[in-house]
Image (spheres, rainbow, N blue to C red):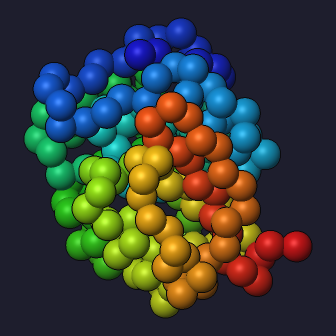
Amino acid sequence: MRVIAGKARSIPLKTPKGADTRPTSDRTKETLFNMIQPHIMDCNFLDLFSGSGGIGIEALSRGAGDCVFVENNKEALSCIKENLQKTKLIENSQVIAKDVLFALRQLEGQMIFDCVFMDPPYNHELEKEILFYFESSKLLASNCLVVVEASNDTDFSYLEETGFSLYKEKVYKTNKHLFLKRREDIK
């Protein structure tokens, strides 16, 4: 796994051992960033369930102003910090070593995010909890893009109840990316 583009291009990234995290492949990451690039420049980026930090680091490398990484796995946290040092992107980043919902509550009133990426453990409905949390949160800027990585069989029939609508979707062999915006932001 490596940084695909930007100022840290081609720098290899460390990933945690084992099956607790699923690093996004270079090909999938490239497709993802081709789709979200217009939202990246100077944005405040939030990387939830960060794993090795590869998505947030890619966003910083491509011009995001700041990135907050949220992860509670100790080995993954170590990888994020090492990868930020290696890519020299630590200055514009903050790493929060907590449960995602606890971290979101802690961030309220401190920051507003333009782009959010979340890759929670599959089939635990954590994305659902977070989307419902965002419904009444002040963390998201107007026109914020929220990207959810999920297994292909994840049910999103509840989506309209959260105040979000599907903006785009990209389906891969075993998983998918859902690009969401608040209903009032879709034109």
Please tell me in which quadrant of the rendered image residue 105 appears.
bottom left
**Above or below, comparing residue 43 to residue 102 in the picture:** above
Q: Which of 17 and 41 is in front in this view?
A: 17
Quadrant of the frame with the C terminus: bottom right
Q: Is residue 145 left or right of residue 101?
A: right
Residue 57: percent from left, percent from top: 48, 33
Q: Which of 61 and 71 is in front in this view?
A: 71
Quadrant of the frame with the N terminus: top left
Residue 180: percent from left, percent from top: 63, 64
**Above or below, comparing residue 13 to residue 158 in the picture:** above
Please report the residue visible at 49 percent of the width from the left and 79 percent of the height from the top. Answer: 158
**Above or below, comparing residue 122 to residue 4 in the picture:** below
Please tell me in which quadrant of the rendered image residue 142 appears.
bottom right
Q: Is residue 54 left or right of residue 157?
A: left
Q: Report the label total.
A: 0
Please report the residue visible at 28 percent of the width from the left and 72 percent of the height from the top. Answer: 101
Please report the residue visible at 55 percent of the width from the left and 29 percent of the height from the top. Answer: 29
Q: In this view, does 171 lie to the left or right of 46?
A: right
Res 18 visible: yes
Please report the residue visible at 53 percent of the width from the left and 9 percent of the height from the top. Answer: 10
Residue 65: percent from left, percent from top: 61, 47
Q: Nearer the viewer, residue 49 or 121?
A: 121
Q: In this view, does 78 lie to the left or right of 113?
A: left
**Above or below, comparing residue 5 to residue 11 in the picture:** below
Q: Nearer the viewer, residue 11 or 121?
A: 121
Residue 51: percent from left, percent from top: 30, 39
Q: Which residue lies furthest to the front in this view?
A: 153
